[in-house]
Every structure is written in C-alpha cells, then in structure tokens.
Image (spheres, rainbow, N blue to C red):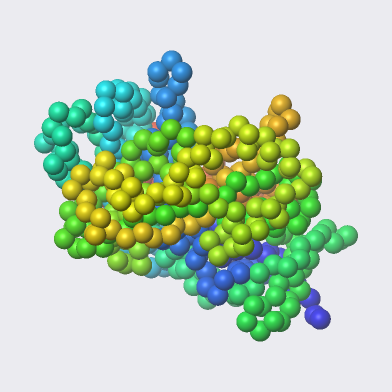
Amino acid sequence: MAVRQADVVLVGGGVMSATLGMMLRQLDPSLDIVMVERLDHVAHESTDGWNNAGTGHAGYCELNYTPETEDGDVAIERALKINASFEVSLQFWSHLVEQGMLPDPKSFINRTPHQSFVWGEDGVKFLKRRHEKLSAHHLFREMEYTESPRDLEEWMPLVVNNRDPMQKVAATRIKHGSDVDFGSLTRSMVEFLETTPNFELMLSSPVHYLAKRDNGRWKVRVKNQKTGELTKLEAGFVFLGAGGGALPMLQKSNIDESKGYGGFPVSGQWLVCQKPEIVQQHHSKVYGKAPIGAPPMSVPHLDTRIINGEPALLFGPFAGFTTRFLKQGSVFDLFGSVRSANLRPMLSVSRTNMDLTRYLIGEVFQSHSDRVASLRNYFPDAREEDWRLQDAGQRVQIIKKSLEGGGKLEFGTEIVAAQDGTLAALLGASPGASTAVQAMIDVIQRCFPDRIESPEWQERMKVMVPSYGQSLVDDEQLLNKVRERTLSTLKLS
C-alpha cells in the first residue's frame, strides 16, 4: 500500500483544525495539508451550532469567568484574558472576510447583546461589584449596569415581564456582543481550503493507528467507513483537534507529555423554542449564575441563536453524566481512556467532586416540567408546550495530575504538545471555539518555533491578526483601533 506523504495532518473537521489549516495555508501556501474527519461531513460534533452555546465567549456576560473571592471581591483576570483572545478571533475572521475567504459575515456571526441577570441581595451586590471592576478596564468600558425596571423592560422584556415587582434584580449589558454559528463558520473555512492546492479532505475516515517513526515523522492510518479502504499517511506534524476524541488519540501517540491526562465527560441538552411570536420578543444572550456544584458549561442562559440562518431561542444547557467522549461516540470511551498513568488522578477527582457527580445525576432525571420551571427564572411566562428538548454536544473536561500527586479537574482548554513540536492536541471545553485563533497561534508558536520567528511568517501573521505580538489587555489604543475595524467588517457595530 502506497504511503500518502503530507506536511500536516489535521485530525478532526471542527473549528480548531479548520482555523489551524487556514492560518498555515496563508503562512506557507506550499504546505501539503490533509484533514481527516470520522463523520461524513465537517463541523458536526462540538463545533455544530446546536452543540455549543455560540456565545462568542468574550467574558461580557459569563459570570463564571469572574468568580467571587473569599474576601467578597471579584477576580476579573480570566475575563480579561478571554476577552482579548476573542478579539484576536474577530481580527482573523475580519481578515478572511476582507480577502473573500469567508462569505457575508451574517452567515456565521450576528450582533446580539450580551447581558448578565441576577436576583436577590447577594446576586445584585456581586453584579454591581463585577461591573465596577470590569468597566474600569478599557476592554469592558462600554458595559452598562442597571437596576431600573424601565431599562430592564427595554433590555430583556421576556425576562422581566410578569416578574415579582418586589424581587431585587440587576443586569449588565454590552451592546456589541455576538452570536456565532461556529458550524457555518467552520464549513465555510473548509470549503475555502478545498479550493486551494495541496489540501485534501478525507471524510468518513477515523484514525485507527498513530505512531512516530524513527525518522521523526508520524504514521497515521485511517479507514474509510463507507468503502473499507485503508489509507496510510505520513506527516511531519499532526494536530489532534477532534474535540472529545482528542484525548484517546493523544494517548495513542504515546508522547511523554500525554502521561497522566484523563477526561471527565459531560453531556448537555437545550430547551428550544422556534415560535416566531416568542423568538421575536427576545434579542440577546442573558446569562445568570450557575447552581452550586454545576460545571461551567451549565451556567444557565436564555439565548437568541441564528443557526444555519434560522432564528431560535435556547435555554440551558442542562448537564448530564455520560461515558461517551463524543456525541456519536461509544459508551466505552471513558473506560477505554483509563491508563496506569492517569488512574490515580481520575480516582482522586471522582472522590473530591461528589457534589458535581450528584448534580449531574440530578440533571439526568429532571422531567420536562422541571426544566421549564428552571426556565421560568429567566422567562416567567414560559409554557411547556412552546419548548422542546434538543441534545447538545459532549464536553470532556480535563483531568490532570496535581502537585500533591492526586488529580485535578480543569474547566477550560489546554494545549498538549510534544517537546519536538511534531504533534499537538487541544483538550478541554469552554471557552473553546471562541478562542480558537489564539489557541492555534499558540500551537504554531510551540510547534513551528523557527519558522514563526522568520520575517516572512511574522509579517503574514500581523496581516491576519494586526495585534499579533502585542497585548490588548495592556494597550488601550491598540484595542480601540482593532475593535473599530472588526465591529465594522463583521457588521457588529
């Protein structure tokens, strides 16, 4: 069997692989790139519009990115980092739109105000302090705060209509927030890549074998599910961007850096309403505080969504426990990921996160009436018959060794790369897709260190991302300059 030689193999047809492919294609058009996807079309797992929040996570409304400290203050550092990372994504997408590599931005991103909503004395006190700290920074200067019933009726009519007038409530708003259909975005990027030379997309082709050769190159064997044909690939660089499927393949790679990593899978579901008379009354993303013990992906929110061009309201997500790593995965995924190197961390996490386990089991056994009752915290007039249940995507949270020798459950994303830079994997979940561009810049810096330092790649990177190499957190003038361009180009102004 002939071996297909390539410079780069991208495993997974989601937003991470597509973003890396687009960036590498412009940094070096001569690179021979192969993308392999286990399903028969791209962007159908975690990247699909129905499988993620589509918030364009920017830290504007997600209260879990600004945790309350023990002394009653609010920590904003993570929100600043996530916001700056999302601004990097907006710059890259703007560049692709300007170059005609992406279609009309309304096909994948739409202006949707980002709002936070709380009730009760403690909630209001927290949100007010959060606003004070965030709005003092240039990244969040446009954030508004209100406790006024008149403002709230304008900002979120469904949320406040027929609410107890004696209940103390408060909200914040950023008008230029966005809703992102990452599925449509990714499909458009892959469609462009397919028009370029030296790019091949292999669908229905899961990876069956992954190993490093003595010459430093990687052997990748894929099998077409429809034809049964085996294809042997060999590449100098492999990226594992397969969502929940990245961990098992990282383990197959057997690189030293993979030792000790485990995964904690979490499923999700949405309540969905597509009745025009209801959908038209709400045009924003309204995030609240997560229940005690809930994972970050379960922060409740009532969202305006535009998925494949169709508007809808989504509420949730409602989390649940699963042993699958992918929505279309196997119930044996979790058990198959157990290794001698990660057994202790995984057992340690299972012992120290019983509140989370109980919460997830409780979510699984909720009835439709229970879920709609939760929705009424954000939409008092919600009726059961107007909402249906929709499965969301799978998320695999990271388990890694702790300094004490046990395990630690991480809620976020992490890049694991071989020391020689020939292989990298992206693990974890939120904020995920929203920070894909910054994450892939990190992959390029770690895996192509010599080339990224060259004048050619430096220049091309700054064309794609004008703020590259500079800090949007520290440089207000730079932030204002790039944000003016992106909001205009992507029609978010």
- Tell me the residue at 60%/37% (across/down): 409
Work out whether 417 lies above or below 37: above
> Percent x, y for residue 287?
33, 41
Q: Nearer the viewer, residue 284 or 394?
A: 394
What is the number of callouts on the image?
Answer: 0
- Tell me the residue at 40%/36% (across/down): 291
Q: Nearer the viewer, residue 24 or 219?
A: 219
Determine whether, in the image, residue 174 is placed left or right of residue 223: left
Determine whether, in the image, residue 67 is placed left or right of residue 163: right
> Percent x, y for residue 158?
19, 47
Residue most toward the bottom?
227
Work out whether 59 lies above or below 439: above
Determine whether, in the image, residue 91 is placed left or right of residue 327: left
> Percent x, y for residue 358?
51, 39
- Tell me the residue at 80%/80% (across/down): 2
Residue most toward the right?
214
- Tell me the residue at 68%/38% (across/down): 347
* Picture quadrant where residue 152 is located: top left
> Percent x, y for residue 62?
38, 39
Work out whether 41 lies above or below 247: below
Q: Nearer the viewer, residue 370 or 484?
A: 370
Residue 195 visible here:
yes
Residue 434 visible here:
no
* Picture quadrant where residue 384 is located: bottom left
Q: Nearer the viewer, residue 343 or 372?
A: 372
Residue most toward the top?
71
* Picture quadrant where residue 58 is located: top left
Q: Quadrant of the N terminus?
A: bottom right
